[in-house]
Amino acid sequence: MFLHFILYFQARIRVPRTYATAAVANSDNGSVLNTNAIPPLLGPGESPGVESSLSFTNYVFASRINHPSLASSLRQPVYVPLSSLLRSKDAAHSSGQVAELDPTVFAHPIRRDILHLCVVHHLDSLRQGSANTKTRGEVRGSGRKIRPQKGSGMARLGDGQSPMLRGGGVAFGPKPRDFATKLPRKVIQMGMRVALSARVKECNLRIVESLDWPGTKTKDMARRLDEMGWDHKMLFVTGKDVIPTGLKRSTENLHKTNTMTAQQVGVYDLVKWPRVVLDIEAVQWFENELSKIKRNQSLVLL
């Protein structure tokens, strides 16, 4: 019995030898430090060498980095090239620049079930629920019995408002109701991450430095979109409180083009529009609201 306990205890505390070459966590502030090579973990009965400067907590974290089930939280950043609505002579030279996006927001695993839940939740909230039918108590008419109960040789009938008669009330008909359903807030947030990640995966997410458009002519905006190779089926999202006036006026008459703020965008909007164009403020707003990594730095441009 004692031997079995010793073997069980050694099996529980045995740590496999693994090498982590990606990163190692600093036990002081939780930051991630890059390193070229990390010495292997020590097994039971082995003593650390003099050259080892990492604590046992860092060793345990380093051993889990390359584990297939635990490495999902340490993803590589998403890089999307920057574009500009303004022409090169009017805008800053942004060719070759890319935006580094948060992988927890823009590289989330695709969940079609979550998208379905969010879309149905949004469409249910749009239903009016104004259908109304009259019951036998609401139909106009007298409550007099149509014919005697017996002696006529015909079926028994009550008043003329019976659902069995033409012009009578409706049995179990629709009444005004609210079709809105409830969905947890975390499910909606996951739906936003999945929708943004799906647009990135499809290469239909564009990031521009700014959505400030100098003019108000629709033909100028249409000509610029044709020059960039973008069709008119797109959604412009700005991180500002209000939509820029030039952009709003120049896209109002464009077919299948819409402009919204980041606070107004929902999962249904990201799924409905084939192409989504974000400015830098919108990207920062989405990362602040949806990111699973709490960080203070703003969007990184490379």
Image (spheres, rainbow, N blue to C red):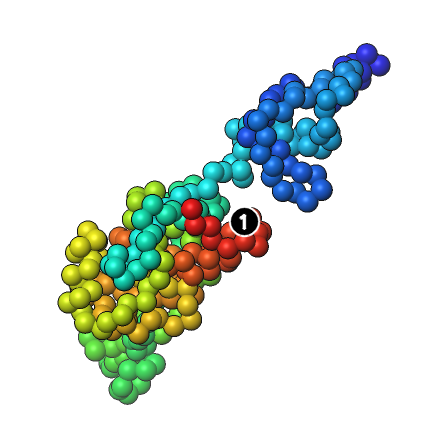
The mark total stands at 1
Residue located 62% across and 33% down the image: 24
- Give the x, y percent position of residue 167: 21, 78
Q: Is 265 placed left or right of 72 in the picture?
A: left
In the rendering, at what x and y percent does residue 2 appear? Answer: 84, 14
User: Three-letter amino acid code at disc 1?
Assistant: Lys
Specify the farthest residue to the top: 3
Q: Front-most of 22 and 292?
A: 22
Extreme front residue here?
Answer: 89
Q: Is residue 148 visible?
A: no
* Closer to the camera in the image, 301 or 155: 301
Q: Is residue 254 left or right of residue 172?
A: left
Q: Is residue 165 positioned above or below 183 on the image?
A: below
Residue at left offset 38%, top offset 47%: 98
In the rendered view, would you say 76 is above or below 19?
below
* Circle 1 SS class: loop
Q: Is residue 104 left or right of residue 154?
A: right
- Residue visible at 30% across and 44% down? 202
Residue 137, given in percent of the width and then of the height, sits at 34, 81
Residue 171 lies in quadrant: bottom left
Across and down, in percent, residue 281 comes to 43, 61
Dot 1 surroundings within 10 Å: few (below 14), some, or many (20 or more)? Answer: few
- Residue at 19%, 60% (x, y): give it: 224
Q: Nearer the viewer, residue 134 or 262?
A: 262
Front position in the image: 153 or 96: 96
Q: Is residue 45 visible?
A: yes
Give the residue number, with chain letter if any, for mark 1.
Answer: 292
Q: Quadrant of the N terminus?
A: top right
